[in-house]
Amino acid sequence: MPTEKNFELGRPVLVCRWRLAGHALPLENRHLRALSRRHVNGSPVPTQLVAWAKQHIEWTLAEGAAACPDGTLMLVVDEAGQAAMSVGPYEPLAATAAADLAYRAQNALEEAAKTGVAPESLWAVRAGALVRDAAEKDAPSGAATLVADLAATLGIPVTAEKDLVSGVISGSAPFEELFLTSDEHGIVPATGSDGPLAQRLAAGYAKLLDSAR
């Protein structure tokens, strides 16, 4: 891991963006578990990199996030397996219509094809159940595991559907509510397609951030 002052990061092959709150990383353990399931250049992320990330968060995040306590923590890994972390301001999504969220999820699925984990996922509500936009073999992101656990607590079944994103984009996928889970943006209900369940989950995420401040 980089320690020298003249360290220069090479071509990025993995970028993780995680939301901060009150100088802390509320979903730290979830993000680190998802990081351990990712791949770099076709190989699993080394355990040493996960350990370095955990140490960096525990030892330097509070000071490093002084200027942006509610910002975004970015982890970048280059093609040589070297990593660096930085903190910047958080910028909320400007466009949150169903199509906007679907296109973001589509880009995330393309990333998952290379790294094994999609940082953002599209979710639909159908007849009181949740449908996630990924095949069962895909490892969930930190934010996605939070929704899955909240759903289990509420007794809501969750399934995966690989064609959900393309169906929303084409207008062929039925849904009652729609929202995005994002490691950076949390739980984002689709404008005009939200509802009581999406709002409840988003409120739960907001409460988690507030408790960290």
Image (cartoon, rainbow, N blue to C red):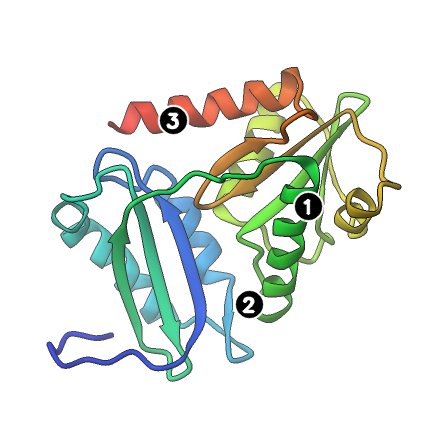
The total number of labels drawn is 3
With respect to residue 146, does 50 lie above or below?
below
Q: Amino acid at mark 3?
A: Leu
Earlier in the chain: of badge 1 and badge 2, it is 1
Which residue is rendered at x = 57% and y = 20% of the image?
Answer: 199
Which residue is rendered at x = 29% and y = 78% of the image?
Answer: 9
> Front-most of 29 and 20?
20
| Residue 195 % position (x, y) | 67, 18
Side (left or right) of 10 relative to 202: left
- In the image, farthest residue toward the right: 172
What's the distance in space between the residues labelled 1 and 3, CA to CA?
Answer: 25 Å
Which residue is rendered at x = 53% and y = 33% of the image?
Answer: 187
| Residue 35 % position (x, y) | 44, 59
Q: Which residue is mark 2?
A: 115
In contact (CB < 8 Å): disc 1 and disc 2: no
> Front-most of 25 and 151?
25
Q: Nearer the viewer, mark 1 or mark 3?
A: 1
With respect to residue 144, does 82 lie above or below?
below
Q: Which residue is mark 3?
A: 208
Mark carried by residue 102: 1
Packing grade of label 1 (10 A; few <14, some 14-19, many >=20) is: many
Which residue is rendered at x = 31% and y = 51% of the image?
Answer: 73
**Label 1's element?**
helix
Earlier in the chain: of badge 3 and badge 2, it is 2
